[in-house]
Amino acid sequence: MAALMAAVISLPLLFSDGASAASKKICLTGALHFDYQSAESGPDKPWKTKPVRNANVELWGREHALGSVQKLTTQALLTDVSNGGFRACYTPEATRSMDQMWVRVSAESSKLWKVTNGSGTTFTWNSPVQKAVSASRSLGTRKPPSGEMRAWHAFDTVNELWWKRGNPRSNCWSAREPDGNTCTELTMQWVSSAPSDGFYDLQHNTVHLAGAVPDSEHTVLHESAHFLQHRLFGGWFPRVTHCSKHWVDKASSETCAWEEAFADSAAAYVLGDYGYVGELGIPISFAHGPTYDDGDTVQGNVDGSLLDLWRTMDGGTWNRTIALLSTHHVSTFRQYFTLRPTANLDTSDKARQLLRNHTINY
């Protein structure tokens, strides 16, 4: 009997208070993609598919059927920038399996930008709930509901501006917000049922998009670039006049042409083209043409001048222009051109000739 008792006592303890010594990490993996109509591909706007990149990822679930649902992840996770992939993991504390688990992806990237609905709620996608999960599972490639695809298109498009924002000194939008401070977040609010429209609200750092507007990546980037310029100026913005209605090829005012052209040119710079494509898929060139008015009160003339300067005189990049706007408040294109030497940017006759090609004579 003593020998038998000793044999029993020497066995390893397998369970304690219901916890499994064999508990291991359980992961849900997959990818999130979205379908969109591409205005940049022409008036027919063919359907295409892209991955959702740099979106916040959370893992949710519960260990026991009677337990409370909770967020299981504690570290910041983002979807992959190449394929929209995600991998979210949790190690059960009291069981060897999970009663429920699912992944939540938000149309928000860290606290840098997000897309909300008309009520201000951030768009989210929840994966199908996985039940009785005892080992890692692949969820495959998934897509948000069809009626929300434009919100995800708008969200993903802003990645392109973020990656080319020309601000290596800070993980915020502007060097005026250095590392360690809370970044100002860009909010985009998309309303599906409203008539197509897009504008930037200075007071609330919010881009308003409606209807089919997100089909145009130029428009999403244009409106987001107003936010970027606002942040480059540290929250200041020029007093813009005669701009309630404005056209690429027609005169408005020096201030209107400057701030609208910066947004136009930012979109073209990011996308690598030389014009603007609206939601209907009709391209507008920034080359001075027969319908164009003359001078620097025409945003299209300033558009072409900015792009020519960046690509011809400034080494193919706008980075020193971004640095200039991060240290000066600039109200007009003339003022910008005059300040270019402060950022070691050329204003020689060769640079001025680029402007003259767009009927701007300084």
Image: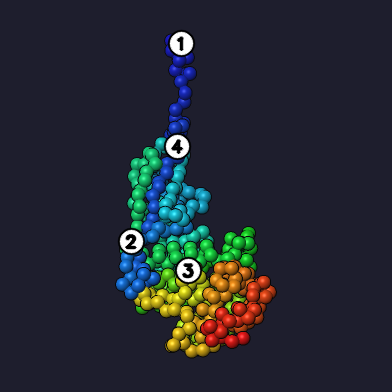
The residue that disc 4 covers is 24
Kindly identify which numbered label has been placed on residue 243: none
Apparent side of residue 112 relative to residue 132 in the rendered image (left or right): right
* Tag in front: 2 or 1: 2
* Tag in front: 4 or 1: 4
Answer few, some or many: residues within 10 Å of disc 3's Cα (few below 14, many 20 plus, some between 14 and 19). few
SS for dot 1:
helix
SS for dot 2:
loop
The residue that disc 1 covers is 3
The amino acid type found where label 2 is placed reads Pro
Residue 242 in sight in this render = no
- How far apart, in angstroms, are the residues tagged by discs 3 and 1? 82 Å
- How far apart, in angstroms, are the residues tagged by discs 4 and 1? 35 Å
Residue at x 34%, y 44% (from the top left corner)? 131
Q: Earlier in the sequence, mark 3 or mark 1?
A: 1
Residue 245 in picture, x, y percent from top left: 46, 86
Q: Is residue 362 above or below residue 124?
A: below
Residue 41 sits in which quadrant? bottom left
The residue that disc 3 covers is 272
The residue that disc 2 covers is 145
The amino acid type found where label 3 is placed reads Gly
Residue 164 in sight in this render = yes
Residue 316 in picture, x, y percent from top left: 56, 68
Q: Nearer the viewer, residue 182 or 362?
A: 362
> Would you say the residues marked 2 and 4 are in contact, meaning their CB atoms lie under 8 Å apart?
no
- How far apart, in angstroms, are the residues tagged by discs 2 and 4? 33 Å
The amino acid type found where label 1 is placed reads Ala
Residue 162 in picture, x, y percent from top left: 52, 64
* Tag in front: 3 or 1: 3
Residue at x 43%, y 10% (from the top left corner)? 1
